[in-house]
Image (tube, helix red, strand yellow):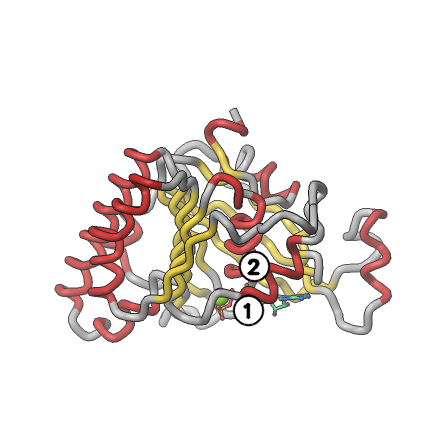
């Protein structure tokens, strides 16, 4: 199943949790606080599927080219002669209207001419921030976005990977909730929560082959990915770390 239906994250624990990786034909959302590792996860998934074609839509920061170059050399099949950016199409978009027209007009044209298996939107939250006072408008735009993406995902059998930020719950300030509200959450197929825990990796929590990482002076925080809802996955979570080599665990 894993090769046909799902795209690997390149991290064993995450692939195990996801039954092989992100499911084609569906929208998966990953949400979490700033610095928890959302972009790292999206970037590594892009790298591991570069040959299948990826569209990476940046709405916050520039595409992290340097980091992409840093983690690519850890591919087991790494070949310095290969251009790992060849099938990666990067878009920088900040306005909700531009995002919608990109997905309505430009993406279908691109998909007619190029093989693409993964579309990342990093993040969906940012373009809709300025609409945050006009909830009706925002809900309509998010609905259109989800409908357009669902139809692209199904027509081209591709993975849509959306990154979402969080808002603090006013009932419990320790508890974070994904942004964009219920109208949006009802339209994504699977929702995953990413957390940077307060646990620091040590010889007990890290597998033997990663013990050399512990010699650095920087503490390595353990990250946790959990399924919040996913039609075909159990409620579960798994741990990993982020190092110069990428997501490992
Ligand atoms: P935001 O919401 O602000 O975009 P994010 O969830 O996308 O945050 P990332 O940029 O994916 O966060 O993760 C940043 C974290 O990844 C850093 O705090 C650091 O711990 C880790 N990281 C990034 N690059 C490296 C590296 N070269 N070596 C080790 N760790 C790294
Ligand atoms: Mg990010």
Against 112, is 222 above or below?
Answer: below
Q: Is residue 135 left or right of residue 192?
A: left
Pick the front one: 159 or 32: 159
**Badge 2: residue crowd in 10 Å (few <14, some 14–19, many ≥20):** some
Residue 178, can we see it?
Answer: no
Mark 1 lies on a secondary structure that is loop
| Mark 2 lies on residue | 40
Residue 127 pos. (x, y %): 29, 68
Residue 242 pos. (x, y %): 66, 59
Asked which quadrant contains residue 111, the reply is: top left
Q: Is mark 2 within 8 Å of ligand 1?
A: yes
Residue 141 pos. (x, y %): 18, 59
Asked which quadrant contains residue 241, the reply is: bottom right
Q: How many marks?
A: 2
The single residue placed furthest to the top in the displayed view is 1
Q: What residue is drawn where x is 70% and y is 57%? A: 245
| Mark 1 lies on residue | 35
């Amino acid at each position: 199943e894993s090769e046909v239906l799902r795209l690997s994250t390149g991290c064993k624990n995450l692939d195990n949790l996801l039954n092989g990786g992100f499911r084609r034909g569906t929208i998966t959302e990953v949400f979490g606080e700033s610095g928890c590792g959302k972009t790292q996860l999206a970037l590594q998934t892009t790298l591991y599927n570069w040959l299948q074609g990826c569209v990476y839509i940046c709405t916050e920061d520039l595409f992290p080219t340097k980091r992409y170059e840093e983690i690519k050399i850890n591919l087991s099949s790494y070949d310095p002669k290969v251009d790992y950016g060849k099938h990666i199409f990067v878009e920088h978009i900040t306005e909700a209207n531009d995002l919608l027209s990109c997905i309505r007009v430009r993406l279908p044209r691109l998909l007619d001419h190029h093989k693409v298996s993964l579309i990342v939107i990093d993040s969906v939250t940012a373009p809709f921030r300025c609409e945050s006072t006009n909830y009706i408008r925002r809900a309509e735009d998010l609905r259109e976005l989800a409908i357009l993406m669902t139809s692209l995902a199904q027509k081209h059998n591709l993975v849509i990977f959306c990154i979402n930020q969080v808002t603090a719950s006013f009932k419990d300030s320790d508890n974070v909730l994904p942004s964009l509200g219920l109208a949006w959450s009802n339209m994504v197929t699977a929702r995953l929560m990413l957390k940077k825990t307060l646990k620091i990796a040590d010889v007990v929590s890290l597998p033997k082959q990663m013990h050399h990482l512990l010699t650095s002076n920087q503490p390595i925080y353990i990250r946790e990915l959990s399924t919040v809802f996913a039609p075909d996955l159990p409620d579960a979570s798994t741990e990993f770390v982020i190092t110069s080599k990428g997501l490992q665990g």
